[in-house]
Image (cartoon, rainbow, N blue to C red):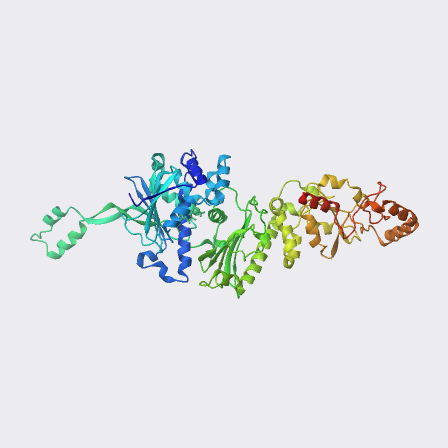
Amino acid sequence: SQNSQKFEFQAEVSRLMDIIINSLYSNKDVFLRELISNASDALDKIRFLSLTDKTVLGERNDAELDIHIKLDKVNNILTIRDRGVGMTKEDLIKNLGTIAKSGTSAFLEQVQQGGDLNLIGQFGVGFYSVYLVADYVEVISKHNDDKQYIWESKADGKFAVIEDTENEPLGRGTEIRIHLKKDASELYAEETKLRELVKKYSEFIDFPIYLWASKEVDVEVPADEEEQAWDDRPNDEETAEEVDDMREKKLMTIKETQWDWELLNDVKALWLRNAKDVTPEEYDKFYHSFTKDLSADKPMAWTHFNAEGDVEFKAVLFIPPTAAPDLFENYYINKATLKLYVRRVFISDTFDELLPKYLSFLKGIVDSDSLPLNVSREMLQQHASLKTIKKKLVRKALDMIRHIADEDPDEKLEAEESMKKGKYAKFWEQFSKVIKLGIIEDAMNHDRLAKLLRFHSSKSGDKLISLDQYIVRMKPGQKQIYYITGQDKKQLEKSPLLENLLKRGYEILFLTDPIDEYLTQNLTEYEGNKFQNASKDDLKIGSKYDQARTKEIKESYKELTKWWKDILAGENVESVKVSNRLANTPAVVVTSKYGWSANMERIMKSQTL
Ligand code: ADP
Ligand code: MG
């Protein structure tokens, strides 16, 4: 038609659609989840807008925030209709074709390397998954600020947008008409299949999802009417009353097929339920549904609680199965990922006032009864309750992590007794940096975090030990926690810097993560025991007697050390000292107490190169 405007898909989007439409990928179910998730997002948006302006909802039916799914088996068209915010003409053009999301190329790369198409939603391009099952798609949309438009494409590199003058007015929202491919129609043009998919993937959607479906119902109908009419004539013996009784007896029950909207999901939010009533499987499913992560890996742990008192909120926090690959890239820019609800209304998932940076690896939701609903984001960010919410969330998060360690039988064994990897070791493998960053950033929870640290040591073999374990094993009279930083454990074990400490049986922590250099600047004491870097010149070993003796020796070698220092004066040597740290090696280079360790020098050099 003359009003139809044609557009070309942005190049990457076009490539992506090519791959999708030609994909032999067997699990095409993902498309339904993605479209329902978009519908739910659009409903969230209009509900959010309605907080400050009720009129945006419109009247009667339009005010119902729901999703309707309908099949036209004759034409193989599947329709998904939401009463969400809708899209203006410009939205349709931008969101569904001309603007590539940042995730587009990342996703393309993944798929080309054989990655799972299932993860499409996480890359922000979920809509295009509809072409797994369709060769032609129409998106009809009505936004409050614009007329009704149709977007359509056969995934052939182009799409068209035209004002809609043919379909019924939507009021508000979006209707997606999916013209199913032949092979897909065999699978998806079945109510049973759709019902099953919604149950499986969209169980936790917070809006009612209806399916136009038939059911067999029992209805009572009069037995053959003509016959009955004849029989109904009263004969001589019967009174009119008796005839009425007989008429009732001649009703019969038959099966009838009725079509109606069938509600598919239970919209009670999981976090509102009592934690005792929610099964581990439900938490797993919930985690996968709201993170859009469909991999089989289960979250490592979760905590579900109800905070009461001045500030009331409910929350569910999860530790993901693995650290996101980009967790530490752009660490200070990345947003926390908790979803914030206020009295069950979704507010934001980019609200970064809820958790400190170092805990931004957690996933979950917070639903607050204490925050105001109809205020701007800026005002919300300054709300006094937020501080309390944040504080409690941090506590609960650290408790959850602590709990993994406490529950882990492997943690209770002595180092030598177990080589296998326990649950906490797995947590540590993924998230050790998070805990260390916490020590650097969160002074309030310093002690709680220090309890969660694990290190290799000169006595721990292949296992990791906690600071509590270190302290239990300290030698009588030992007042310091000895550690050394470096690149790898094997190398450190052989370091002459440790000779005498090892000979005397002290345990030494091996700190081999570059971040440990920063960690030790913020971790100077644990339960009254000072940390001592064994590569620094202030290392003192042994009893008072030992040290008095060292002092004597120092005196008698004064001339020699002075002579030596004078010779090395031009070589960046600050001083030459007698010490009792060595056993076999005659001399060793150490760093001064307040200077960088050799390891830190190395790290700084590699950073500036
Ligand atoms: P994402 O949902 O991650 O943003 P999608 O590819 O699924 O990515 O959707 C792209 C965009 O298209 C959405 O961000 C939204 O702006 C728009 N959109 C898709 N479906 C709908 C819908 N049902 N109602 C309103 N807008 C929608
Ligand atoms: Mg989406």
Please indicate whether residue 480 sits to the left or right of residue 330 in the image.
Answer: right
Image coordinates for residue 508, horizontal then vertical, percent: 75, 46
Outermost residue, left side: 236
Q: Residue at x 48, y 60 (%)?
A: 377
Q: Quadrant of the N terminus?
A: top left
Image coordinates for residue 230, horizontal then vertical, percent: 9, 48
Image coordinates for residue 175, horizontal then vertical, percent: 34, 48
153 relative to 386, above or below: above
Residue toward you, 450 or 518? 518
Please indicate whether residue 485 sits to the left or right of residue 243 in the image.
Answer: right
309 relative to 117, above or below: below
Image coordinates for residue 553, horizontal then vertical, percent: 90, 49
Residue toward you, 505 or 242? 505
Outermost residue, bottom side: 310
The answer to whether residue 348 shows anywhere in this view is yes
Residue 159 picture quarter: top left
Residue toward you, 176 or 478? 176
Residue 589 picture quarter: top right
Please indicate whether residue 552 sits to the left or right of residue 206 in the image.
Answer: right
Q: How many marks?
A: 0
Q: Quadrant of the C terminus?
A: top right
The answer to whether residue 414 shows anywhere in this view is no
Outermost residue, front side: 2
